[in-house]
Image (spheres, rainbow, N blue to C red):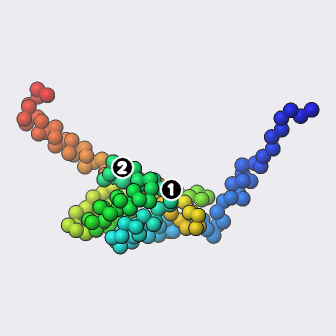
């Protein structure tokens, strides 16, 4: 007698049947186009237009907010304030990795704020997936300030402490 039987498809077959066709698969050029689409949405100064670049269950971890943005409303809320600076990003350096149904673009971008011309360099990562409408959207976006600026500020603080307190500290 058979007391237990398990039957399943081999995982390779499942992945092959589910994988994106070669015509739908992202290229590095298309991943860079998705970055441009997001950047162009920033230029509209419309937070809803920018939020439309994100998947419905996306997570956005911005450099200038302590709040993880994991709903459309929270993403719109972030961009409502951020877009007042009229930001534009320039891709500086990065690495693109492409999977069957996803792509990642991670590296460094520089923002120029149109309101005053100030610049800031950030590390970033974008992960793109197809949404229910078969459109590539941002599922994960993380941005953080480059640590060099933080380290320089710490060194300056230590120098000020040394002037004020000598070697007593």
Density class for disc 1 (Cα within 10 Å; few <14, some 14-19, many ≥20) is: few
Q: Secondary structure at mark 2?
A: loop
Q: Is residue 8 something one can see in this rendering?
A: yes
Q: Which residue is mark 1?
A: 57
Q: Is residue 93 something one can see in this rendering?
A: no
Q: Secondary structure at mark 1?
A: strand
Please give left or right for residue 145 compared with residue 27 in the image: left
Height in image: 167 above or below 110? Answer: above
Please give left or right for residue 155 compared with residue 56 in the image: left
Residue at screen point 75% across, 48% down: 10
Q: Nearer the N terminus, badge 2 or badge 1?
A: 1
Q: Position of residue 82 (x, y in %)?
A: 30, 61
Q: In the picture, which quadrant includes the N terminus? A: top right
Image quarter for residue 74?
A: bottom left
Asked whether the beta carbons under mark 2 and mark 1 sit within 8 Å of each other, the answer is no
Which of 52 and 111 lies nearest the eye of the viewer? 52
Image quarter for residue 37?
A: bottom left
Height in image: 86 above or below 2? Answer: below
Q: Which mark is residue 100?
A: none
Q: Which residue is mark 2?
A: 67
Q: Position of residue 85 (x, y in %)?
A: 26, 65
């Amino acid at each position: 007698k058979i007391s237990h039987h398990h039957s399943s498809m081999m995982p390779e077959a499942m992945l092959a049947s589910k994988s994106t066709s070669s015509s739908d698969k992202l290229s590095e050029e298309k991943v860079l186009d998705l970055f441009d689409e997001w950047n162009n949405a920033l230029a509209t100064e419309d937070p809803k237009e920018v939020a439309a670049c994100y998947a419905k269950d996306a997570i956005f971890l911005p450099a200038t907010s302590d709040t993880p943005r994991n709903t459309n409303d929270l993403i719109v809320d972030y961009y409502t304030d951020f877009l007042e600076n009229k930001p534009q990003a320039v891709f500086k350096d990065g690495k693109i990795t492409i999977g069957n149904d996803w792509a990642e673009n991670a590296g460094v971008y520089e923002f120029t704020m149109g309101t005053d011309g100030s610049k800031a360099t950030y590390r970033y990562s974008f992960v793109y997936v197809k949404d229910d409408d078969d459109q590539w959207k941002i599922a994960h976006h993380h941005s953080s300030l480059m640590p060099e600026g933080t380290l320089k500020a710490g060194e300056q603080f230590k120098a000020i402490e040394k002037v004020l307190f000598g070697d007593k500290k």
